[in-house]
Amino acid sequence: MTTQQHLFPGRFDGKVLLLSGSAAAQEGELMGFGGATAWRFLREGGAAVVLTDVQDGPGEKSAKSMRDAGFTAEFAHHDVTDESHWETIITGALEKHGRLDYLVNIAGTQDTMAIEETPVETWQQVMDVTNRGMFLGVKHGARAMRRSGGGSIVNLASMAARWSSPYGAAYAASRAGMTHFTRGAAIQYAKDNIRVNSVLPGWTKSPFTKWIFTDEKLSKYRTDRVPLGRWGEPEEIASAILFLLSDDASYVTGSELLIDGGVTAGFYPPVGD
Ligand SMILES: NC(=O)c1ccc[n+]([C@@H]2O[C@H](COP(=O)([O-])OP(=O)(O)OC[C@H]3O[C@@H](n4cnc5c(N)ncnc54)[C@H](O)[C@@H]3O)[C@@H](O)[C@H]2O)c1
């Protein structure tokens, strides 16, 4: 971790959090956004976390490591594109924990090809995991949160929602879809005391980007384009997610929180130095 992080003890007392795409959550190993968010949520008083992912082995190990540390955590196999999985998992969380307060839609996949090289199946897969998965999560998560008296949902988009590239035909479009869906959901669920926001990370070290940051050339190309001069850490994305989940963000809904070290603020590096 490159920055000092502060805990807010008691911020999530009694609350229950579900995170999709959160298998990589073992401390001491390379963690995803879900893992960093889950650990800090538990340390700030959270009653229980439900980790879900298609990767069962790492997910089970992650949940066990949290239980071994004295917290309440479980893992459920979950393909976010399958509505029946959402129904089962959310019904199970309500039965087991009595409530669901927060949902973070993290599951994601990426494509790296130019438009004419991209098979339609690849386009569809990216759209399904990010957009269909998020839609199903909000649909079933909001139902459970209404029963709990309200809640907060964060959708993990990307700076690619604002800033595209010649590669990844579906990725940027799917991320922009996430931020716009978020605005509609925020308006729809405000009456139920459910806030919905999106987070737009820049280049952050996680399993998702290991193939990039472990390649010197690919990594440097990106570092050189970050005004803050480095990659982000999952804990820095978790800070933003937890802010939006918490009552600290009680008047924030339908918003996008960009956490990209300044990449999309403008042209960088300076020309002509
Ligand atoms: N790391 C970055 O630099 C970065 C930047 C911007 C956006 N993001 C987005 O943030 C999200 C989280 O990424 P991360 O960095 O925590 O990496 P991560 O690889 O730990 O998380 C993504 C998880 O999604 C899971 N997943 C894929 N398809 C799924 C499906 N159909 N159902 C359920 N789970 C599925 C994967 O198994 C993986 O565990 C992703 O959506 C990614 O696109 C990451």
Image (cartoon, rainbow, N blue to C red):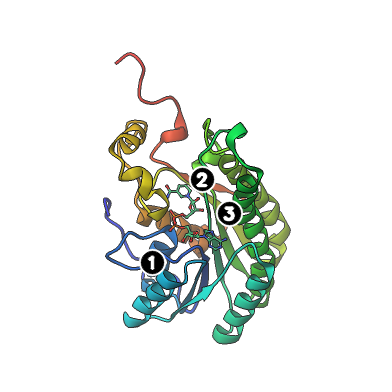
Rendering coords of residue 31 (x, y %): 36, 60
Question: Considering the numbered disc 1 on the image, is that residue within a helix, a strand or a loop?
Answer: loop
Residue at the disc numbered 1? 25
For this rendering, which residue is in front, 166 or 200? 166
Rendering coords of residue 134 (x, y %): 62, 58
Q: Earlier in the sequence, mark 2 or mark 1?
A: 1
Residue at the disc numbered 2? 158
CA–CA distance between discs 2 and 1? 20 Å
| Residue 149 quadrant | bottom right
**What residue sits 63% from the left and 72% below the top?**
85
What amino acid type should be assigned to the residue bearing mark 3?
Asn
Camera-near label (1 vs 3) is: 1
Residue at the disc numbered 3? 197
Question: Considering the numbered disc 2 on the image, is that residue within a helix, a strand or a loop?
Answer: loop
Callout 2: few (<14), some (14-19), or many (20+) C-alpha neighbours within 10 Å?
Answer: many
Question: Considering the numbered disc 3 on the image, is that residue within a helix, a strand or a loop?
Answer: strand
What amino acid type should be assigned to the residue bearing mark 2?
Ser
**What residue sits 63% from the left and 64% below the top?**
137
Tag of residue 240: none
Is the residue 99 above or below the residue 40 in the image?
A: below
**What residue sits 36% from the left and 17% below the top?**
271
